[in-house]
Image: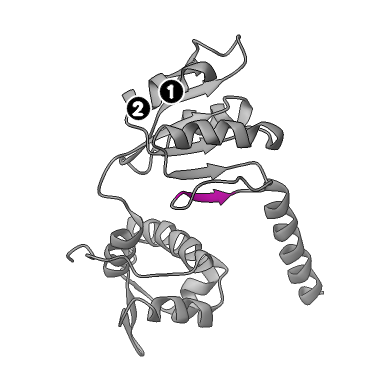
Amino acid sequence: MDRLIEKPKLSKATTKRLSLYLRCLKELHKEGVQRIKSSEFSQLTHVGSATIRRDFSQLGELGRSGYGYDVSYLISVFSSILDTIEEKRIALIGCGNLGQALVNNNFRRNDNLNIVCAFDTDPEKIGSVFNGVEVYSMDRLDEILPKEKVTVAISTVPSQYSQAAMESVVKNGVTAILSFAPDPIKVPEGITVHYIDLTTELQTLIYFDELAQSRRG
């Protein structure tokens, strides 16, 4: 299948589900599964079958009634939407325990997503190398980010420091930021910021778990 020339305009919630779908489909493909119905896929992804069909319908005719969906075809469709065909060079801002875990993983399932440099204020971390990625002083942002052609930043910096840090990365050409600090960051128009609040994610998980347990009871 040819890559989509234009990416469809999807909601953030739908896009997150597509990422989940793609991950599950790749596992099915490894297991030799060739086609799957929405009801079966629902059990695997824990997403309602009606929601799955609605998400899929936004992308065209992906399946046939009574037949289901071709796994390989879905992988090609979702990959064309979600996967980048260009290398995205990423800076990690904050190299504590979470930051080190991220750089040690370094998106090994996607060759086009690469953390190429890391920054911290801790003298004990500066100069260290994690999984081949050197940790620089925050004072060197202006030097290193343009040199490494970084366009994406992942921030694990606490909320009280994240605004100043992100102003520095935006100034140096970063247009996309993934922040693990829950407080919003003020950025210029045209800069995309997504937030991951682990407390919120855990609370959401527990809510749905307790809801499921009560229904079983």
Q: In which quarter of the image is residue 34?
A: bottom left
The circle on residue 100 is none
Q: Residue at x 69, y 37 (%)?
A: 159
Q: Residue at x 56, y 30 (%)?
A: 99
Q: Which residue is drawn at 35% across and 43% down?
A: 110
Residue 87: percent from the left, percent from the top?
A: 29, 40
Residue at which label 1 appears: 142
Residue 15: percent from the left, percent from the top?
A: 46, 64
Residue reaching furthest to the left: 2
Relative to 29, 126 lies left or right:
right
Residue 202: percent from the left, percent from the top?
A: 71, 52
Residue 216: percent from the left, percent from the top?
A: 77, 74
The foreground one among 176 and 110 is 176
Residue at which label 2 appears: 146
Report whether residue 2 is seen.
yes
Q: Quadrant of residue 175?
A: top left
Magenta-tinted stretch: 191-195
Q: Is mark 2 on a helix, strand or loop?
A: helix
* Disc 1 residue type (three-letter): Asp
Relative to 87, 44 lies left or right:
right
The foreground one among 142 and 196 is 142
> Is 159 in the magenta?
no
| Residues marked 1 and 2 touching at CB (< 8 Å) | yes
Task: Give the answer, above or below, for where 59 lies relative to 188.
Answer: below
